[in-house]
Amino acid sequence: MNANVSEKPFHRILLTGAAGGLGKILREKLKPWADIIRLSDISDMGEAAEGEEIVQCNLADKKAVNDLVKDTELILHFGGISVEAPFEDILSANIQGTYNIYEAAHLHAVKRVIFASSNHAIGFYKTTEHIDADDPVRPDSMYGISKCFGENLSRYYFDRFGLETVCVRIGSSFPAPNNRRMLTTYLSYDDLVRLLHSAVFTPKVGHTIVFGMSNNPSSWWDNRKAAHLGYQPQDSSIAFQHLFPPSGDYPDAEDIGANYHGGSFITSGPQYK
Ligand code: NAI
Ligand code: 15L
């Protein structure tokens, strides 16, 4: 066997948001997938280990993003503001930033992007409603609107140029659920990696929207429209149910956040007097 020939599926892939909560997990987990992982964030990412390249840049800087994407085969776009924020900040990091990623991906003939979308693209559905990927978006915040933008932008780049995307509407991906709502929205880190593996290695994905959730005892989201990905979650929030024991009045009709998929995000947007 020629020692110079790699057996990894990709030569170089790009992960944005590498300094973030999920980025730090993925930095390790993606290593078997590529000879080189190019890590990017606006924040410090420490030193590059073997098989890593570090590029610190602002996603809103079009020239910098163009250079960032050059020579990569796949992009996992996790960078950006991950909670509600003033529109101008969302515009720069999430809307301009995601546009810059897609423009560069097209110019450099990247074949596929995995876009970290969010449940907040559909957060204004009530918890009594069950939806699938074909139901209309109902963003619950400026942040959620930026995720709808990314989903529509990626649809356009697929229809116009054939650039494939899997939009992962991540529920709540943390070490454990932090509240009762997250018993429904929880996505374990291992299931996140399983889902990304399906999104990256399924031969044809076109433009797919998939809900990022573990095999939780309750769900508001139906993933049958993304069945071609073959994603099989193996974890469940059931292991954490004891942390949030049932109480008779949940969801309390007065607690508006408890009655919507997006939880408290639905009141986090602009406040008017
Ligand atoms: P995070 O906030 O920990 O990480 C986001 C990273 O993006 C940060 O390191 C930040 O420095 C970087 N960033 C922000 N603005 C930037 C800019 N202008 N240029 C370059 N980098 C910038 O968020 P987390 O939890 O790691 O989420 C990662 C992605 O997944 C985000 O896009 C988020 O919206 C999405 N997501 C995460 C969920 C979760 O439960 N963790 C749920 C739904 C979506
Ligand atoms: C998200 O989109 C956020 O990035 C994350 O911080 C959580 O708030 C998550 O949604 C959630 O809905 O739990």
Image (cartoon, rainbow, N blue to C red):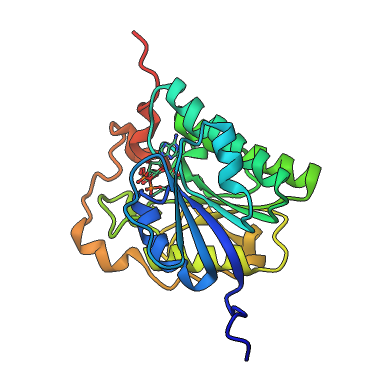
Q: What is the quadrant of the N terminus in the image?
A: bottom right
Report the number of discs.
0
- Residue 99 on image: x %, y %: 61, 35
Tell me what residue is drawn at x 78 percent, y 50 percent: 162
Tell me what residue is drawn at x 27 percent, y 45 percent: 250
- Residue 218 on image: x %, y %: 41, 59
Nearer to us in this view, 171 or 49: 49
Residue 151 position (above or below residue 164): above
Horizontal placement of 204 versus 55: left or right?
A: right
Horizontal placement of 77 versus 99: left or right?
A: left
Horizontal placement of 163 versus 124: left or right?
A: right
Q: What is the quadrant of the C terminus in the image?
A: top left
Nearer to us in this view, 59 or 81: 59
Tell me what residue is drawn at x 55 percent, y 45 percent: 68
Nearer to us in this view, 95 or 180: 95
Which of the 4 quarters of the picture holds residue 48?
bottom left
Q: Residue furthest right?
A: 160
Residue 11 position (above or below residue 17): below
The image quadrant in which ligand 2 is located: top left
Task: Determine if residue 217 is in view.
Answer: no
- Residue 84 on image: x %, y %: 38, 31
Which of the 4 quarters of the picture holds residue 231?
bottom right
- Residue 17 on image: x %, y %: 43, 47
